[in-house]
Amino acid sequence: MRASELKRAKRDIRRSVLAARDALGEAERIARSTVIHRRFLALPELEGVGVVMGFWSFGSEVSTPPLLDALHARGIRVCLPRIEGGRDLEAVVYEPGHPLTGTSFGGREPADGTILTPEALDLVVAPGVAFDRSGHRVGYGGGFYDRFLRRTRRGAPRIALAFDLQVLPHELPAGSFDLGVDAIVTEAETIRCTPGRSEAGAATSQT
């Protein structure tokens, strides 16, 4: 697939899935998010983890603030992404009540704080718009996470939080630069992606 075709295909998927996600009512979104939090906190990948890169949800995303608080309550150090220089993400240590500033994309990021290297992260919680069961991911189009994930430690799990409607039954278009995830936690199931690094593969489900 040519670059222009890939970009167009991702744009169409992004538009369709965002429309479906935005159609969720607030109460329904919070209820589904709560189930996702419970599933995520039960993951074996969290055992012995010291540092987690999360994200501060915005719009119709799976709500993450309660999950960040729960990780803190377990004694896990939490980082949030901050866009540095308009191109790259950096991992900034977050504490409850830490001041956040708005971004040009509509999200929120730490105003300041200790910056950790990507290699210091034990696990990365990845946002996204659409996923497939092999771990392919369509994000918001900036390429920030693809660049960031390349710098994380080999073997550090990459886990997506998504509503079930964001996981499509067909394989998503992906380029050589795109990186996938190892697992997707939805309100309906936890999908184990194999290999989960943007190559096609099988997936297993835990309901």
Image (cartoon, helix red, strand yellow):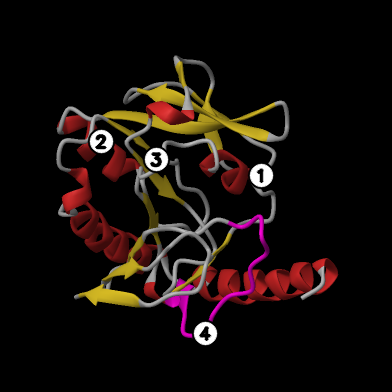
In the image, is residue 174 part of the stretch drawn in magenta? yes
What separation in Å lies between label 1 and label 3 (alpha carbons)?
17 Å
Quarter of the rendering occupied by the N terminus = bottom right
Q: Which residue is mark 1?
A: 105
Can you give x and y, in whole percent of width and height, for residue 63 in the image? 38, 52
Q: Amino acid at mark 2?
A: Asp
Mark 4, secondary structure of its residue: loop
Mark 3, secondary structure of its residue: loop
Picture quadrant of residue 191: bottom left
| Viewer-side label of 2, 4 | 4
Residue shown at 40% from the left, 57% from the top: 160
User: Could you classify mark 1 by the number of other residues whose Cα lies within 10 Å: few (under 14), some (14-19), or many (20 or more)?
Assistant: few
What separation in Å lies between label 2 and label 4 (alpha carbons)?
35 Å
Pick the residue in front: 202 or 146: 202
In the displayed structure image, the side of residue 20 where residue 143 appears, left or right:
right
Can you give x and y, in whole percent of width and height, for residue 93 in the image? 40, 22
Highlighted range, magenta: 165-178
Q: Which residue is mark 2?
A: 69
Q: Which residue is mark 4?
A: 170
In the displayed structure image, the side of residue 150 where residue 194 appears, left or right:
left
In the displayed structure image, the side of residue 94 where residue 59 appears, left or right:
right
